[in-house]
Amino acid sequence: MGNGFREFTEPLSPGTTVILCTDGLIERRHESLDDGLRRLSEASRADLSPERRCDQLIGELVGEASDDDVALLVFEVAPEDEDAFRLNVRSELGQLAVLRRRLERWLGKRDADRNLVYDVLAASGEAAANAIEHAYDPSGGVVHVSAEENADAMTVTVRDFGRWRAPRAPHRGRGIPLMQALAGSVEIDGSEHGTSVHLRWDLGVDRDPS
Amino acid sequence: MTHPEGLRLDRVRETPVARLSGEIDLSNAAIIKRSIAENVSNQDLSLVLDLSGVTYLDSAGIAMLFDLSRRLIQHQQELILVVPAGSLLHRSLRVSGWPTSTSLVERVEDAIGPAAPGDGRDLSGP
């Protein structure tokens, strides 16, 4: 604390590989840290699984001459799955449109009719707006949205990692009833670790056409 | 004066008409409401809000409509919404309790009435 370390949140898109390491991996005597980082980024170009990348990086960068401990953690964000939708957005109002575009694209690949598409976008949007407005303090956080479709149902889960707070803005009084009217069912799980809103639409049932 | 994106304000035979297009959500509802409200004068009998081009309306947008309506009613004025048949907005409005019987029409002309003979030009100009 107090020596320049900063906490931050960075949404990662599907397929991204993250490499976390101690300076032992890249630091060499008589060489700047930037040169070491450059070596690491060059060595990371090959397309490898996280496990093989760990071996490769240790092999290429550490060699025998290391006199420092080395810790290396490599992980990959699961690549985009055709059947499942996953998206992390920052808790900012402008992200509501980003969520709608991405979810719309995913729904577009399925056989959903336009009423269902609208209902899913609108109910998910209400849940996300709630999380963006109420879950975090002003420094913000991340809202995670996932969706799945199987033979019986379409489900969407909107999750935040903040603390539930009763809605304050007057329009929020309309948000939850609207969400309940648009989704087949709504379940809200709140805990000190965050809130999850589960939305579900049974497929193959007659939908209100209006 | 510039207006938020997706909002066009004009007058049809002296009645203020606000035409909205695109998506209305928590990120732009407040600024749109302010711009619309500023365009209505005390002399106007009603405000026509054309939602024909709106593709998405969330609860913040619906709250905006209720708030505009309430403010107008306080001045014995009326808010008339234009929402075409088949619009996906109907569903959200209905479940939110928007009074469909009186204040919802399908076209701007339905709200303002047909042009009288010789009334084809905009007479509000200089």
Image: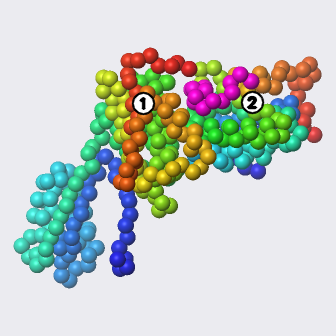
Is residue B100 left or right of B121 when viewed as pictured?
A: left
Residue A95 seen from this side: no
| SS for callout 2 | strand
Is residue B69 left or right of A104 when viewed as pictured?
A: right
Q: Is residue B91 magenta?
A: yes
Q: Is residue A40 magenta?
A: no
Q: Quadrant of residue A68?
A: bottom left
Which callout, 2 or 1, points to the residue nearer the camera?
1
Q: Which disc, if any, is residue B80?
A: 2
**Residue sitting at x 8%, y 76%:** A65
Residue A141 x %, y %: 42, 56
**Residue sitting at x 26%, y 57%:** A18
Marks 1 and 2: in contact by CB < 8 Å? no
Q: Nearer the viewer, residue B119 or A193?
A: A193
| Vertical side of A140 occupied by A77: above or below | above
- Quadrant where the C terminus of chain A sits is top right
| SS for callout 1 | strand
Q: Residues within 10 Å of mark 2 (few under 14, many from 20)?
A: many
Is residue A140 left or right of B37 when viewed as pictured?
A: left
- Residue assigned mark 1: A185
Q: Residues within 10 Å of mark 1 (few under 14, many from 20)?
A: some
**Residue sitting at x 15%, y 70%:** A70
Q: Which residues are magenta?
A: B88-102
The kind of residue on which mark 2 rests is Ile
Q: Nearer the viewer, residue B9 or B92?
A: B92
- Quadrant where the N terminus of chain A sits is bottom left
Whole-number angstrom distance, CA of label 2 to CA of label 1: 32 Å
The kind of residue on which mark 1 rests is Ser
Q: Quadrant of residue A178?
A: top right
Dot 2 falls on which chain? B
| Vertical side of B31 occupied by B117: above or below | above
